Structures are given as C-alpha cells and as structure tokens.
Amino acid sequence: MTVILIEMEEYFMKIQIKEIDHTTRSQVVRFIKDNWGSGIMVVKGRVHNMEELPGFIAIENNHILGIITYNIENNQCEIVSLDSSKENNGIGSMLIERVIKNAQGEKCNRVWLITTNDNTKAMRFYQKRGFTMKDIYVNAVKESRKIKPEIPMFGNDGVPILHEIEFEKEL
C-alpha cells in the first residue's frame, strides 16, 4: 500500500493507494455501477465484468476517491476504467502510474485504453500523461449498445456518443 500526502491550499489529504481485494470489491462494484450504469464495461465489442478485474483504489478515511481497473493479455495492459470523485488533485494520475508500474513488472509492451468521442476531457488527460491516439473506431458505440443498452446516446456537453478512440502508451 502506498500513502501519498497531497497539499491543497489549507487542506491536506492522506490518500492510500491499495490493490482491489475481497474486502473492497463490493464497494468498488457499487461505485462503478453508480458511475457507469452497470457492472460491465464494453470495449471494442468485448465485455469486461467489473467484479473480476484487478485494479487499484485511492482511499481517504475509508472513502473511495478513485478507482482504476485493468486487464493484462498478450503482453498488453488495457485500462478498462478510471474514475476519480475529486478531479484535478492527482488521483487519476497516481492510479495510472500504479497500473503502468504493474504492467512493466508483468513485461507488457504497452498500456492502452478506449474512450468515447464525447470525452474530450479524458483525451486531454491521457495525452498529458504520455498516451497517444492510436485508432478511431467509427460508430463502434452502436455495437456496444447492443450488449450494454445503458450507454447513453449523448455524453459530455450534449455530444452524441458514437465512436471509440484508442489511446496507447508504449513501455
């Protein structure tokens, strides 16, 4: 477990980064269901069950501030989800760093993820952290909705959610 202190004006946060385990799994799944509409994620037509994925949580005073889940296959690490309830405090960055460190230890040659075309904030976030846009899957979300109908038609700023955009960071 890693403990990190973050100074914010007149407030200190003592954030712990912990691996998701049997003691935190139900809390993590509830958090994901609340934020993503269900306990599954669909990426490029593939279903990920959030109850089974490894990951890390950022917690303060036993309260989850952020979650990252990932999947490692064929020397590649896919970030499946990243959530932070306190944005612009470095929580997402810390979680990504932990996954990258873990992926390096597992001899992965890249870390990759998918976001949707409406999520321009995520696009900026990942690019600032060394990820590059690798591919765009036009109208892929239409297929994903067949598996997960909870995916909304419109996202950030009223933008129609249509396409999946792949970002990667080579290791």
Image: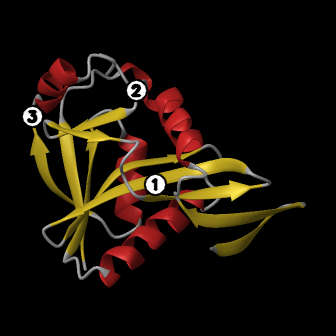
> Which residue position holds label 2?
38
- Residue 153, image quadrant: top left
Instruction: Estimate the x, y position of residue 2 in percent, counting from the top left.
Output: 64, 75
Residue at the far front in the pictured view? 22
Q: Could you say whether the residue bearing mark 2 is in a helix, strand or loop?
A: loop
Instruction: Estimate the x, y position of residue 94 in percent, counting from the top left.
Output: 54, 67
Q: Could you say whether the residue bearing mark 1 is in a helix, strand or loop?
A: strand
Amino acid carrying mark 3 in the image: Val
Please state which of the two labelled residues, at mark 3 or mark 2, is closer to the viewer.
2
> Which residue position holds label 1?
68
Residue nearer the viewer, 98 or 137: 98
Q: Residue at x 49, y 38 (%)?
A: 29
Give how far apart the Cα atoms at labels 2 and 1 are: 16 Å
> Which residue position holds label 3?
138
Q: Residue at x 17, y 73 (%)?
A: 75
Give how far apart the Cα atoms at labels 3 and 1 are: 26 Å
